[in-house]
Amino acid sequence: MRLNRDQMRGKAQTVLGLVEPSILGKTLMHEHLLWNVTRPDRRAMPAEGGPDARQYFRILTGDVIDPRDTTQRDRELAAREAELMVRAGGSSIVELTIGGLCPDPEGLANVSQVSGAHIVMGCGHYVQDYQDPGNIDRSIDSFAQEMIDQVQLGAWGTSIRAGIIGEIGSQWPWTDLEKRVLKAAIMAQEETGASLTIHPSRHQDHPWMLVEFLRENGADLSRTIIDHIDRTIFDEDRLFRLADSGVVLEWDLFGQENTYYAHANIDMPNDGMRLKTIRTLIDRGNVNQIVISHDICHVIRLAEFGGHGYAHIQENVLPLMRRRGYSEAEIETIMVGNPRRLLTFV
């Protein structure tokens, strides 16, 4: 059964159905619970059993490529890991495994029921290299209708509905297909009243290109999230310009403390540096534009394999924020208020 705009307005949508946004509580805005981020040309390699934890550092830095690290289809494992977050005081997870990354809506519903975590599912398509080759010939309207249906009717052949659009993928150079998918996502945002979350390329000027594209195509910038700020923007001029545009900025790699970032030649910040950067935005009045998460999409980062897991922000980051002078009101805004606003249909 298709839900209409009036039925959804003022509600949030988890994989178990519409809910009052007030129940969402502390929310991780960008995670993966069941996923396959293995490059398509490597998906024929064995991916059972989990990675070798003895290779933890080499896997973390990309020196060892192991599909068992980039594929996680075990619902029971996902539920155990999500339950650790709930026990630590967390409540909700935004799960952004979308087209190209092997989404499992029914699996997410099972994980939510077992773990007690509220799970909000994303929709749409990831970067072109991961997309179905048949997408190259699809129209903007077909992508838009697909995303509208995923929010209002059901996603990926199920009756389980998405509660946010994205993470819509873009790489560098930014491709025509990715631009068409993003334009369609903006149309779906307008039609459904859902928020939109975007995976930018690793080019430092690409987030601003996204802002210009969003403006040109009529997006609601106040309900649009630019992901992965902590691996993309490294100077205050670019950061403040983005903040002044009105978009929401997401630091979603908390727990990644390593200098040796596998995907680009950059100096990754640690959690302390992330908090210092976020502090500068709060001090200039942008606290309502900040959300945080871990973006776990490697098995080696799960607690059962020696990683920090989904409870890391609850167990380690929030106490560090308090030690660094963050007020309870600021923490509440970042962890509860901003996610609640973004996940409420308008």
Image: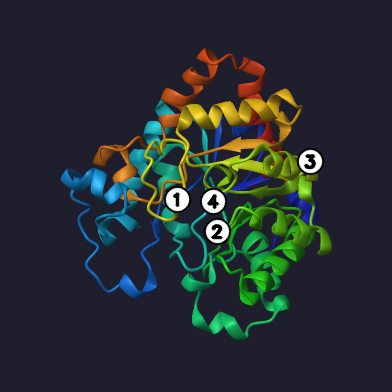
Image depth: mark 3 or mark 1 in front: 3
For label 3, the residue is: 244
Name the residue at 50% across, 82% down.
133
On residue 15, the disc is: 4
Residue 225 image offset from top left, x and y in percent: 66, 48
**Callouts 2 and 4 close, C-beta under 8 Å:** yes
Name the residue at 41% across, 47% down.
111
Q: Secondary structure at mark 2?
A: loop
Q: Residues within 10 Å of mark 2 (few under 14, many from 20)?
A: many
- Upstream in the sequence, badge 2 or badge 4? 4
Q: Nearer the viewer, residue 81 or 320?
A: 320
The picture quadrant where one finds residue 147 is bottom right
Q: CA distance from mark 1 to mark 4?
A: 14 Å
- Upstream in the sequence, badge 2 or badge 1? 1
Name the residue at 81% across, 58% down.
215
Q: Secondary structure at mark 3?
A: helix
Q: CA distance from mark 4 to mark 3?
A: 33 Å
Q: Is residue 222 left or right of residue 313?
A: right
Q: Residues within 10 Å of mark 4 (few under 14, many from 20)?
A: many
- Upstream in the sequence, badge 1 or badge 4? 4
For label 1, the residue is: 32
- The three-letter amino acid code for the residue at tag 2 is Ile
Image depth: mark 3 or mark 2 in front: 3
- Image quadrant for the N terminus? bottom right
Q: Is residue 90 above or below residue 78?
A: above
- Upstream in the sequence, badge 3 or badge 2? 2
**Callouts 1 and 4 close, C-beta under 8 Å:** no
The picture quadrant where one finds residue 162 is bottom right
For label 2, the residue is: 160
- The three-letter amino acid code for the residue at tag 3 is Asp
